[in-house]
Image: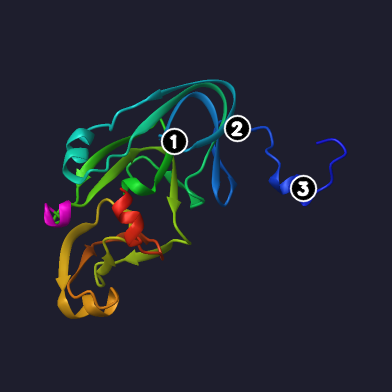
């Protein structure tokens, strides 16, 4: 880089040496992880690394084989082990870091998981009330403590849910929610034709209780959906 002049080399773009283990935002579109031991990431999401790292494929996790059979989309993970730094990103989606504390349980759609600390445990669950309708709605429930790297197309909207006001979200747009919320599927003919461009019936996920739900502003486009 010596002698080369460009905005590209400004300090904001430069990868600085890690000051602490674990994940930090490199920028809005990527997460840097200083690995000391082990961490997990979605397969194919690592864009660069340095140091002494080994990588191994991790199947689907608990219940994942079933999930793949039912929905045709598991969340294939890889384990990254050793000492070094790795950068993760996915299709230029926005990246966020969620701190999960002991006692928390967070449900995240598999398609929105980027990477996470080995101190977090996760299992794949069927969303209650979402049974087999439309292939079933499956999510990863994270518990324990540690950081979770989440990806989202567009800027996410976090909506508080309270006992007084349940929230209805489009199943395609939901990123995740506090796992203690009660979920059920809600079908509405009339609302559907307004929300989903006149497609007739729509299915929303109804969330009740105390907590929050994370929604992405963009919908799955038909081309993307068929690609899965």
At a point 84% along the width and 41% down the height, the residue shown is 4
How would you rate the neighbour count of disc 2 (Cα within 10 Å): few for under 14, some for 14-19, many for 20 or more? Answer: few
Q: Using residue 76 as the reference point, say whether residue 198 is left or right of it.
A: left
Q: Which mark is residue 20?
A: 2
Residue sitting at 17 percent across and 36 percent down? 66
Instruction: Give the labeled residue for mark 1.
Output: 44
Labels 3 & 1 near each other (Cβ < 8 A): no
The residue range painted magenta reads: 131-135
| Callout in the foreground (3, 1) | 1
Image: 1 above or below 184? above
Secondary structure at numbered mark 1: loop
Q: Which residue is mark 3?
A: 10
Pick the front one: 195 or 16: 195
- 2 to the left or right of 151: right
Above or below: residue 55 compared with residue 93? above
Counting residues from the N terminus, which is met first, the one under dot 2 or under dot 3? 3
Residue 213 in the image: x percent, y percent? Answer: 33, 60
Q: Which quadrant of the structure image shows residue 187?
A: bottom left
Q: Secondary structure at mark 2?
A: loop
- Would you identify the image quadrant in which residue 168 lies? bottom left
Would you say residue 206 sits in the magenta stretch? no
């Amino acid at each position: 880089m010596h002698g080369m002049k460009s905005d590209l080399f400004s300090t904001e773009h430069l990868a600085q040496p890690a000051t602490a283990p674990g994940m930090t935002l490199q920028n809005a579109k990527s997460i840097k992880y200083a690995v000391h031991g082990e961490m997990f990431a979605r397969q194919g999401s690592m864009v660069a690394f340095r140091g002494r790292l080994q990588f191994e494929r991790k199947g689907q996790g608990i219940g994942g084989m079933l999930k793949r059979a039912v929905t045709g989309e598991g969340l294939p993970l890889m384990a990254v082990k050793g000492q070094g730094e790795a950068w993760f990103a996915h299709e230029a989606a926005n990246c966020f870091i969620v701190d999960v504390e002991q006692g928390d349980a967070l449900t995240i759609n598999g398609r929105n998981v980027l990477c996470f600390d080995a101190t977090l445990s996760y299992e794949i669950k069927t969303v209650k009330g979402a049974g087999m309708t439309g292939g079933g709605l499956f999510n990863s429930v994270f518990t324990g403590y540690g950081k979770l790297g989440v990806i989202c197309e567009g800027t996410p909207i976090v909506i508080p849910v309270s006992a007084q006001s349940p929230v209805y979200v489009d199943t395609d747009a939901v990123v995740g929610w506090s796992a203690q919320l009660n979920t059920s599927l809600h079908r509405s003919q009339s609302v559907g034709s307004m929300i989903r461009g006149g497609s007739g019936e729509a299915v929303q996920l109804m969330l009740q209780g105390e907590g929050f739900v994370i929604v992405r502003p963009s919908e799955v486009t038909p081309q993307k959906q068929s690609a899965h």
